[in-house]
Amino acid sequence: MKEEATSRNGKRKRQRNPKTPKEEPNETPKNQNNDKKRQRDTKTHKSNQHGGSSALSKRPKPSNFLDTLREKLSGGNFRRLNEKLYTCSGKEALDYFNEDPTLFDMYHTGYQQQMTNWPELPVNSIISWLSSRSSSLVVADFGCGDARIAKSVKNKVFSFDLVSKDPSVIACDMSNTPLESSSVDVAVFCLSLMGTNYSSYIKEAHRVLRPSGWLLIAEVKSRFDPNNGGADPKDFVKAVSDLGFSSSLKDFSNKMFILLHFKKKEQLNSNKKKIEWPELKACLYKRR
Ligand code: SAH
């Protein structure tokens, strides 16, 4: 079943912009000899750029060199923070960012750069879905980032993230939101099922959703690729269903992300069997 059209992205080429960190950022190892790099830069400069006789004119501009270094450092910081978020619990992540909220800015700068490599943003699919429905639906955006959903739709949106960079964003660990039970119509997780305790986020969504409310999940496709250590989407859908949802959409057409939609069942689940939540592979970025 498919509710909305998603574009075919497989053929679109990734832009080769050397200033933008790639899916696998091309990092300089920390202790790489900068002199070697400078020599290489100078050589490149010699052969490609000026060809003049002045030694000075053959050197790379210091600002270019410093810019490149800064980009490499910020790419490394993003990679480290990203790994932290995927490998710790929501509570640990909250404490971590509370200790130094500037790390959150660092993470999101890297995240935004990363997203420039994606031909289509999953958050836009969610915005389109919401825009095609009644704006009276109350939405909870779990792991909202820059709260793009709240800024783009007319609905009342409760936006949650570990740090609040905007007065509209409520800072909390999303396994424990301040929402009343059965108070929202749509719960959204857009690339935010990051913690090792991700099932507690979905349980919280189940608590705050009204019966027949929607659960919309967009996640990185590679996390659901069983051939590459990812979870089997069937196991994930089964676990969410066992919690008390019915699956209404499984869309794997996008190259980068999958979309899964569920509806909260009217009746409480009488089956008390332990739910088997599959481990979701962390989405890590390699250092080259
Ligand atoms: N949904 C946004 C941002 C995705 S990045 C978008 O699609 O653009 C994932 C976000 O989830 C990050 O901002 C991260 O801080 C947040 N997040 C991860 N674990 C969280 C938790 N336990 N509680 C609240 N937010 C969390």
Image (cartoon, rainbow, N blue to C red):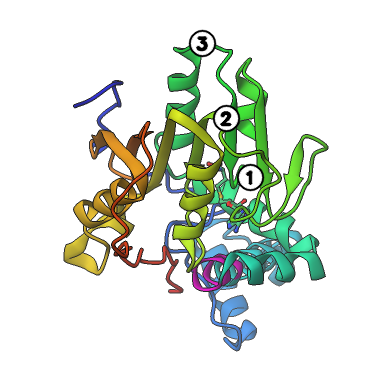
Q: Is mark 1 within 8 Å of ligand 1?
A: yes
Residue 47 shows in this picture: yes
Tag 1: residue type? Gly
Q: Name the residue under label 3.
A: 134
| C-alpha distance separating marks 3 and 1 | 24 Å
Work out whether mark 2 precedes mark 1 in sequence or the reverse, and give the earlier one. 1
The magenta span reads 81-88
Determine whether 135 is above or below 143 in the image.
Answer: above
3D distance between C-alphas at marks 2 and 3:
13 Å
Q: Residue at position x 53%, y 44% from top?
A: 207
Q: In which quarter of the image is the C terminus?
A: bottom left
Question: What amino acid type is highlighted by mark number 2?
Answer: Val
Q: How crowded is mark 2: few (under 14 residues within 10 Å), some or many (20 or more)?
A: many
- Most prominent secondary structure in the magenta stretch? helix
Q: What residue type is labelled 3?
A: Ser
Q: Residue at x 29, y 36 (%)?
A: 246
Which numbered mark, 3 or 1, is in the foreground of this view?
A: 3
Q: Say which residue appears at 62% left-offset and 77% top-offset.
A: 38
**According to the image, label 2 marks what residue?**
184
Q: Residue furthest front?
A: 270
